[in-house]
Amino acid sequence: MSLISTSLLSADSRAQIDATLDGALARIDRRAQPFGGVFAELGAAMHRSARGGKRFRPALVVATFESLGGDASTNGCVYPVAAAFELLHAAFLMHDDILDHDTMRRGVPNVSGQFRSYATRWGADASGAALVGDAAGLLAGDLLLHESQRLIALCPATEDERVRLLDLLDEAVLVSAAGELADVAHSVLDKEPAAADILAVTHDKTAVYSFAAPLRAGALLAGASPEVEAMLAQFGSRLGLAYQLVDDLIGAFGTDEQAGRPAGADLREAKQTALIALARATATWSQVSDALALAHTGPIAVRHAQDMLDGSGARNELERLVNNALSEARELILPGYVPPATAGMLGDLVSAVEARIP
């Protein structure tokens, strides 16, 4: 979504968001230094891991605010709130990496990976290094969660705005945590989760914190009506679901460039995605299952698994669900209900997600 972020934000807005993020991360680093030891390393590691990224969530906050008539130069909360959603995202990624036992992010060591390397150099064995790495990643995520809340709590909002913004953040954290735990539970306790359950997890893990909540936050800061905010919540819910379902398609059928990793990685890793749940309900599931069992063996096996999934009808069904969600999102953009600038932005978001379908 990097191109979308670029089109939503002016260069000045991006610079303001980056400056706010850098300030928040530098504050954590500065306060960590007096403790010395391993904790003094944590702030710098967090700063390195949170650097870069698409800035999509803060872009939604700022773009929604401005499209609804807000002026960021006179509102001291816009950039702190935008940065808060980026820190929330960074925190979730750090916790998610621990759950997935990942030590790399965007091609470089994440916080857990950095601290595993530190611990190894300090003399720890493999299990000890893993323990130190996971502790660092967990605590870094906790600190970022706190910092995201702090940014909102201290911005110069009215009391009513502050309470409503914190409620948005609270809902985003709660729903995402529910989705994450359900996802892990399905992978361990339920070897054949139903498609409806997978779709619920797909929605809860991302749609609220990445789409609905940032859109609502921008509208709230712009003084939009409760009706507009409610519409944006529904829009973000449908768009967020579509976005994640497209990710499932890309993970199974996308190119290396689209996926940002080897093609068919989800199939190699036997991920329980909505695509697989839909395939399980088809008449050819036994053949699909046999093909998926061999997908980890190499590119030819991946290609065969892709062909079997395609032939089963699961790919078409998933694309239908994506298109339905996008159509529902489009139908919410009623003429005259929001300013033309907002309607245009929302329409562009739908088109951008649609363009990602492999």
Image (spheres, grey):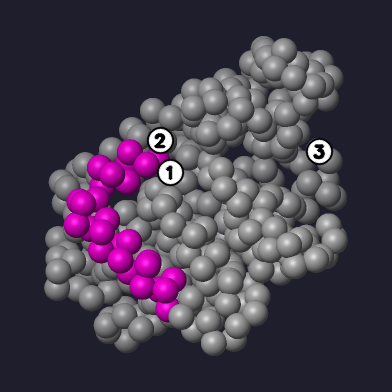
Image quadrant assignment for residue 137 = bottom right
Q: Residues within 10 Å of mark 1 (few under 14, many from 20)?
A: many
Q: Mark 3 vs mark 1: which is more N-terminal?
A: 3
Mark 2 near mark 1, Cβ–Cβ under 8 Å? yes
Is label 2 in a helix, a strand or a loop?
Answer: helix
In the image, residue 41 above or below residue 94 = below
Q: Residue at x 23, y 76 (%)?
A: 76
Q: Which residue is mark 1?
A: 239
Tag 1: residue type? Leu
Residue 99 within the magenta-colored segment of the rendering: no
Q: Which residue is mark 3?
A: 192
Q: Is residue 287 visible?
A: yes
Cα–Cα gap, marks 3 and 2? 28 Å
The majority secondary structure of the magenta stretch comes to helix
Q: Position of residue 244 (x, y in %)?
A: 53, 41
Q: Residues within 10 Å of mark 2 (few under 14, many from 20)?
A: many
Q: Position of residue 1 (x, y in %)?
A: 40, 41
| Magenta span | 1-27
Is label 3 in a helix, a strand or a loop?
Answer: loop
Q: Position of residue 348 (x, y in %)?
A: 28, 38
Cα–Cα gap, marks 3 and 1? 26 Å
In the image, residue 232 above or below residue 152 = above
Mark identifier at residue 291: none
